[in-house]
Amino acid sequence: MANERFESAKIEYENIGVDVEAAINRLMNVPVSMHCWQGDDVKGFDQDGPLTGGIQTTGNYLGKSRTPEELMADMDKAMSLIPGKKKINLHASYAIFEEGEVVDRDKIEPKHFKKWVDFAKEHNVGIDFNPTFFSHPKVKDGLTLTSPDEETRKFWIEHGKACIRIAQYFAEETGIPCVMNIWIGDGFKDVPADRMGPRQRYKDSIEKILEQPYDKSKVKICVESKVFGIGVESYTAGSAEFTLSFAASHEGCLPLMDNGHYHPTELVSDKIPALLCYYPEIALHITRGVRWDSDHVLLLDDETKEIAKEIVRCNALDRVYMALDYFDASINRISAWVVGMRSWQKALLNAMLMPNEALKKLQNESRFTELMAIQEELKTMPFGDIWKEYCRRCGVDEDITWFTKVTEYENQVLSKRN
Ligand code: RNT
Ligand code: ZN
């Protein structure tokens, strides 16, 4: 039965010039990075203080992971319910120390991530990495790489360098390049007296971090911009103009756009093709901001679909590093991962099932009436039948049955945590 529906859907797509088999096979090989920090509300293992840096989790749903073992078990459960090729995305704060071992962030080493490498190898996935410039006592008055205090700035520069060494270790161990993303929450709540000074120090700091020798084919260093954060509403040092200009002027450095980090009327879908005209490679944090950078779970909404369409129709699946970035503590955290990752897979498949070349031609011939009509008709194509077949071929649940597995895990495992 199921296959009959797939076969008939496939014919419908073929009739509009879409190669369904090619789309399915391509999607199976597009890596998407799953962020570890959804599992424990961005807590990490290396400190006990609050989440800082202008980001917030809200909610207190049962079962958040408390240890590396729990986090890995939860990620493993989520990954078993998500189709497609994955990577895992770690923060430096997820370093795993021996009993009693105390290592500050400027001194962390590859060995503190050995267990993550073992986990990645077991799952046959690559690892992406993020230095953690927040939630730490050495964040001085909210500042790290922009701090006027040289000792503070030096500490965080050393952290950045340590992270490059760890990123290279990940790439060498897994054989898959590691995307290493620099994001800082540095900024000011109220009208600053000096906007350029912090940015000059930020520029100098990243340049010093980049003095760490590394192999550019193995480590892809990104800078992530942001318009504002909670408590830093008036000014953030790493604005869009700052990070884009930094990436453009530093060999091998990629810009990273998080679609929660712009004014709500600005669209990252439109920014992707603009950057692809200039950068060989770019990176994304894919999220869903509700009224602000709220980091809600990704859904298959219009902008999510549009972002995927731009990557696909720019033929840029090999040029765009995709990572999910959100954190919801108000619902089952495994489900949060699964819904978000499945939504992004759906968005990519949807984009691949469009007659993109034919649509471009309509635009170029100014046949806008027809273009609108066809784009609307495409919305009711039997996408779900192709999606289910894709899930079957990936060996994961094709429908909501995955949720019963999450419920079982919640009853058997998560509800026993406190
Ligand atoms: C914060 C940035 C940043 C973080 C993660 C945890 O606004 O989006 O990427 O979400 O590094
Ligand atoms: Zn982000």
Image (cartoon, grey):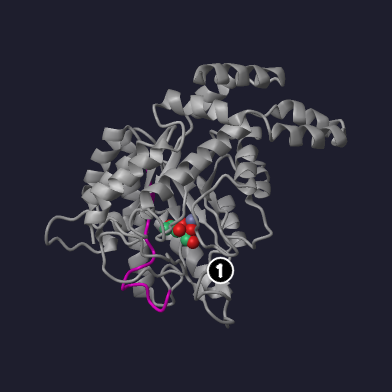
Q: Position of residue 329 (x, y in %)?
A: 39, 60
Amino acid marked by disc 1: Phe
- The residue drawn where x is 53% and y is 64% is 238
Q: Position of residue 201 (x, y in %)?
A: 48, 69
Decide which of 274, 339 is in the foreground and name it. 339
Q: Is residue 297 above or below residue 84?
A: below
Determine if residue 278 is in view.
Answer: no
Query: Does the magenta portion include 355?
Result: no
Overall secondary structure of the magenta section: loop
Numbered range of the magenta stretch: 127-142
Q: Would you say 411 lies left or right of 252 here?
A: left
Q: Is residue 125 above or below residue 137?
A: above
- The residue drawn where x is 43% and y is 33% is 83
Decide which of 22, 109 is in the foreground and name it. 22
- The residue drawn where x is 29% and y is 56% is 63
Decide which of 195, 112 is in the foreground and name it. 112
Query: Does the magenta portion include 129?
Result: yes
Q: Would you say 391 lies left or right of 174 here?
A: right
- Residue 132, quarter of picture: bottom left
Residue carrying label 1:
228
Q: Position of residue 139 (x, y in %)?
A: 37, 72
